[in-house]
Each structure stands twice: as structure tokens, then as C-alpha cells.
Amino acid sequence: MSLLKANPTSSYILSGGSMMYIDAVCNGIDDIPTIDNEVRQTLMQRLETEGLEKLCELLKELDPVHWEFVDKKNPRRVLHALEVCIQTGRTYTSYRTNRKQERPFNIIKIGLNRPREELYERINARTEDMIASGMIDEALRIYDNRNLNALNTVGYKELFEYLDGLTTLDEAVFKIQSNTRKYARKQLTWFKRDKNIRWFHPNETKEILKHIDSFLF
């Protein structure tokens, strides 16, 4: 995903970024309070000792509206909502206005996509290249921190299972490829909802530049 931010005097290109990050840049974000580390650590400990189901029950008490639609199998989302409720004494829902904010710039959105078979072949090859380029050594260097949420990502989590002796290396590579393909499909589904994105094959350089020029000149 690429987008070009432009005003009458200058232009900037923002390339890549997560789905939520791009949405925040284009539409703004809700003013969610920063959470104290003590509150966060307390809830993390409760997650370990009481389990996710108990914390979901607590969220139902503190914010029944958000409880209705939150992903109850996703501890990060449940914990974040609870952090806000406990720290502020207000419901997480009360902060979620989802109001689109005025942006001080114009936006041109460009999406890059390939035919599905071509995309999957490149994902599979890229995974093999990462393994050959030392990704296992990289996973070993951060292995002691494997329980951090930031490392619960495609690539690392499968290699951690391999390093724990739970799978073979071939199985880990296959899982990385499979999970990356699933994430790619998820990204495309998300972005296809945005009718302002103009889609191109990455090799369509001339067409992309012509499309940008039509907005700038």
C-alpha cells in the first residue's frame, strides 16, 4: 500500500505501514489515554494467573458495550480495553468516537497488487530467502524475549516453535509461508473496502505516474 500526501507547495510519499497506521494517518485517531506501566503490568499478571476468560468477564462488567464486539480470543485487545477502563474510570467505548478528522493535506491513495498466484510464489520465495539470510540466528538473539507481544508476529512465532523443539524447520518454514499468505489476504480485504485507492501492478510505473500527475497538475 502506498499513498501520496500533497499540498500546493510540496509532496510526500508514505509507503507501507500497517492497516491501522495508514487509517490513522488518513483519518486521525481517537484520543486514547497513555497507560501507566503499573496498570499494564498488573493486568498482564492477572492474565497469567487468572486466564483470558476471567479478564473477559471483567471487561463485561466495566464496558459491556465494547465486550459485545471485541475479539475475546485476542488478549492484546481485551487487555488494552481493560487498561483504559481501570486507569480512567471510564469505559473504553466512551473514547471510541471513530470520528473522521480533518487533515491538513490532500491524499492520493495508490495500492500495489499482483495476481494471486504470482503473489503467493513471491511470498514463498521471500520466506526461503529470509531463512537463508540468517533469520534463524536473528530469532535466537531475541529468543529470551519471545513472550513479548511485539514478537508475536508471523516469522518469529513459527521459528520460536522450532527453537522450542515443537516443530521441524521445514514445518516452521511452511507455517511462515502459509501465515504470510493469510495475512496478505487479510490486508487486501481491508484495503479493498477503501474506494479511494487506485490499484496498479507494481510494474505499471508509467500508469502510476500518470495517475499522480492527474491530481497534481
Image: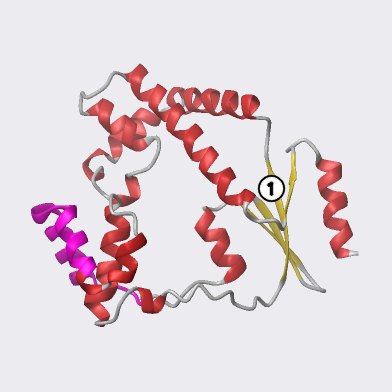
For residue 15: magenta? no
Q: Crowdedness of circle 1 by 10 Å Cα count: few (<14), some, many (20+)?
A: many
Where does the image place residue 170, in percent across and percent down from the top left? 36, 17
User: In which quadrant of the rendered view does residue 196 lie?
Assistant: bottom right
Relative to 189, residue 170 above or below? above
| Magenta region | 33-60
Front one among 128 and 96? 96
Q: Please, what is the three-letter code of the amino acid marked with disc 1?
A: Gly
Quadrant, the C terminus: bottom right
Which residue corresponds to the image point at 54% horizontal and 29% vertical from the top-left? 123
- Left or right of 22, for residue 179: left
Q: Which corner quadrant of the image does residue 214 belong to?
A: bottom right
Residue 53 against residue 186 in the figure, above or below: below
Between residues 190 and 177, which one lies in front from this camera angle? 190
Which x, y percent locates residue 119? 61, 30
How far across and how far down the image is residue 205, in percent? 81, 41
